Amino acid sequence: MPNTKPPSQGFLDSLNNIECDDLAPVSKRKSSSNEKLMFFGRLLIVLILAVAFVASGIHVTSSFIDLTFNYQDWEDLLRSGIPSLGGGLIQAPSIPNFDGMLLGEDIPEPPPQEEADRFLLNRQRIQSATHQNRNTPGTIIGIIAIYSRCRTRTLVNYPVVQGSDNVYYLNHLLDGTRSAVGAIFLDYRATQDPRTPLQNFVIYGHNIGIQGARKFAHLHRIYNTQRGFSDYPYVVIYTMTGIYEYTIFGAARVHESGGHNHVCFNNNRHNALHYVEGLRYIQDNSRWRRSGITLNENSRLLSLSTCTNGPSHERLHIAAVMTNWTHFG
């Protein structure tokens, strides 16, 4: 019979043959750098998708809420009326069908809520400027603002005053204080209604940058580069009764005695033709051109004039044509 060891003895012999390395812990396999990059890449993609999903949901919800409540706010404003300077309320003749607007029906829309808010805000500014100007010979006409294409930035934003001449507000502030900064003022020969036919609504201001005021100095950004001309296309004049919107179509350096500051044209056929010729001359001699502008005898012209850093007789002329107006009372 072969000499075999019992199982228990074989187990004891195997313990005697164990070496130190056999008792060491088993080392873990190290991950390669490529596997780590893939893991973090997948994690980053998941995080980006999650953030985009949440942001989209918030944006859609917010847009719907804003749309609903903005129409409701405008309806409340029309129902209650707009405060009048002389007391009382300016009432709208009728209330639009806001439910139909939300459903997409073909119903004329009221002025956007944002524009209504701006109108009320600038009415308050006009009232404040009128109080400030109470001891001077001028009359506050409104507020002039030059907006960017998205209407989130302004290049100019000042009250406009009209005096008995074109001299006083060259060196006086609205409160009558003598200052080289002056004020933004409407030509004394112009009527105060921007809708007057065959009228050049000329507004003057200094090219200056002292005492924290820039006045019309920023108009040069519209002339100096095509980007400036493109970025700030809109001029808006707020009055106590309405909003007048213009689109800039011309920018040129002219002689101070040129026709750019010719204000009034008699309302007859001969001068209507002369008026249209003047509009097209401005457009043809502009440094930059804007497409889609139609000029005729029914166009309402706005001219902004300031001095340059060149010869003393030179003026910067920015021309705009009225494209829309909203009457509030």
Image (cartoon, helix red, strand yellow):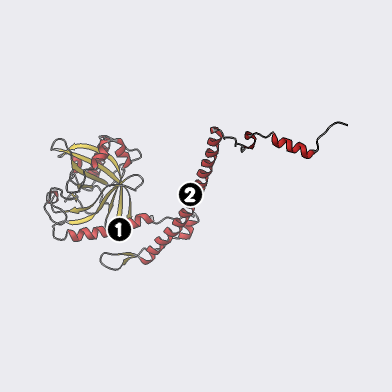
For label 1, the residue is 121
Q: Picture coordinates of residue 59 (x, y %)? A: 47, 51
For label 2, the residue is 55
Q: Picture coordinates of residue 273 (x, y %)? A: 25, 41
Task: Bin the neighbour count of mark 2 within 10 Å (Cα to Cα): few under 14, some 14-19, many 20 and up.
Answer: few
The structure residue drawn at horizontal position 72% and vertical position 35%, both measured from the top left corner, is 14
> Residue 18's quadrant in the figure?
top right
Q: Which mark is residue 268?
A: none
Task: Bin the neighbour count of mark 1 within 10 Å (Cα to Cα): few under 14, some 14-19, many 20 and up.
Answer: few
Left or right: 141 as drawn, with respect to 50? left
**The C terminus lies in quadrant:** bottom left
Does residue 150 appear anywhere in the picture? yes
Residue kind at label 1, given as amino acid type? Leu
Q: Picture coordinates of residue 179 (x, y %)? A: 12, 50
> Residue 91's quadrant in the figure?
bottom left
Query: Of all residues shown, which one is farthest toward the right?
Result: 1
**Mark 1: secondary structure:** helix
The structure residue drawn at horizontal position 18% and vertical position 53%, both measured from the top left corner, is 162
The structure residue drawn at horizontal position 14% and vertical position 51%, both measured from the top left corner, is 169
Does residue 93 appear anywhere in the picture? no
Residue kind at label 2, given as amino acid type? Ala
Q: CA distance from mark 1 to mark 2?
A: 32 Å
Label 1 vs 2, first from the N-terminus: 2
> Residue 176's quadrant in the figure?
bottom left
| Badge 1 vs badge 2, beta-carbon distance below 8 Å | no
**Mark 2: secondary structure:** helix
Q: Picture coordinates of residue 226 (x, y %)? A: 30, 35
